[in-house]
Image (cartoon, rainbow, N blue to C red):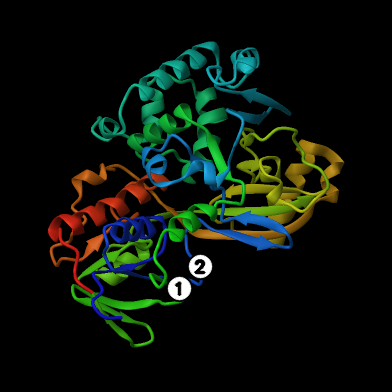
Amino acid sequence: MPNIDTLVVGAGLAGLNCARELTRQGRQVLICEAADGIGGRIRTEQHEGFLLDYGFEVLQTAYPEARRALDYAALDLRPFRPGALIRHDGMFHRISDPWRDPLALFSTLFSPIGNLADKWRMAQLRRQVQATVIDDIYERPETTTLERLRELGFSTAMIERFFRPFLSGVFFDPDLSISSRAFEFIFKAFASGDTAVPAAGMAAIPQQLAADLPAGTLRTGTPVAAIDPTGVTLASGERIAAGNIVVATDSASAVRLLGRAHLPATRATTCLYFAAPEPPIDEPMLVLNATGKGPINNLVVPSLLSSNYAPAGQSLIVISVTGNPGQDDARLGADVRQQLGEWFGRGITAWRHLKTLRIHDALPMQLPPVRHPRHHDPRQPNGILVCGELGNPTSIHWALYTGRRAAEAIIANSPSSPSS
């Protein structure tokens, strides 16, 4: 393909948004994606009539960059109920956001998930993060999330029964060693909008971005072996020249392509998918394990959000386990079933295991220091640009943001569109 203005390596959210911003400015863009599909970590697999999202994936509707880039109405977003059902002391306890779910005020205030002082501190934290713009969150003094929660005065019970299982599901970090900035950013998102999934599964998000690209922009199944400032060499040996090169891959691939020595550490998660004749809960809420025992971190029933997730007459249950357990899949499945039986009784014998998915590099660790991407120039000293998770905070918001920022850097460097 002659006269390519920009070649983007990777068709995750960052790469797709970068390409979309450039093509809207009349630029000729080519995306080379190694996988057979798009979306990076945001994927949905069709399996026996079920939609299996790639791990516990959700969209926070309050993300400013998602509001800017995505058509929420077209995605037909289906929100979870605010709050969570928390398994503790042999029972499920409901804790919710009384500002958005007033009917849950009594159960939230008098649940054993923390004391009344904890509930007041939660309200104060909610008010504080809602009043703070995202840019300022990333300028605050930084520590680990565990230290930040202790500084805020939360009791050990509140940390162990709510924050640890909740944040383990978000960041896959049971130690709460992630940056306090990353925690406050995600807490602001949860407090300010809905937690939702598209009716057709999370893959609808990258599909919507890709639908705006001109025909011929995207080549899947096209791994890139090497890059330089003037083009790329594919694994097939083909050489493609371009005026700009953007690396928008996962961290490990970006490090390899850029020739860097340091590979960022990542967190793992494991998901087990089950089909059931009926759901174990009656409303679309996140179920958290606060017992401190067993493999389960959280449970969701996506088919309560959208009937597309399961065939008629069936329910889809997704169990998340933090990390990559040492047991093989059969032993892990048996341990999960045993814990489910303790929670829901004999009914789980009718559940059918669909799949176990081990995601070894689910997310970068986001240990301190974590800085706002505005402090990072997307253009490297050799002229190659980088967007996505390498060196940046991670979320749908930041993937879209860094992709747009890389496109703007290209446009600013060469404002006029090249001739064909």
Q: Quick one: label 2, few (<14), some, or many (20+) residues within 10 Å?
A: some
Q: Are marks 1 and 2 in contact (CB under 8 Å)?
A: yes
Compare marks 1 and 2 and give the one earlier in the sequence: 2
Residue 169: which numbered mark, if any?
none
For residue 128, which quarter of the picture? top left
Residue displayed at 34% across by 88% down: 237
Residue 337 picture location, percent across and down: 75, 49
Residue 314 picture location, percent across and down: 80, 49
Can residue 173 be seen in the rendering of this structure?
Answer: no
Question: Considering the image in quadrants, where does the C terminus appear?
Answer: bottom left
Residue 37: which numbered mark, if any?
2
205 to the left or right of 379: right
**Separation of marks 1 and 2 at Cα, in angstroms:** 6 Å
Q: Which residue is mark 1?
A: 220
406 to the left or right of 361: left
Residue displayed at 39% across by 46% down: 69
Question: Considering the image in quadrants, where does the N terminus appear?
Answer: bottom left
Q: Amino acid at mark 1?
A: Thr
415 to the left or right of 348: left
Front one among 410 and 362? 410
Q: In the image, is residue 11 above or below residue 99?
A: below
Q: Quick one: label 1, few (<14), some, or many (20+) residues within 10 Å?
A: some
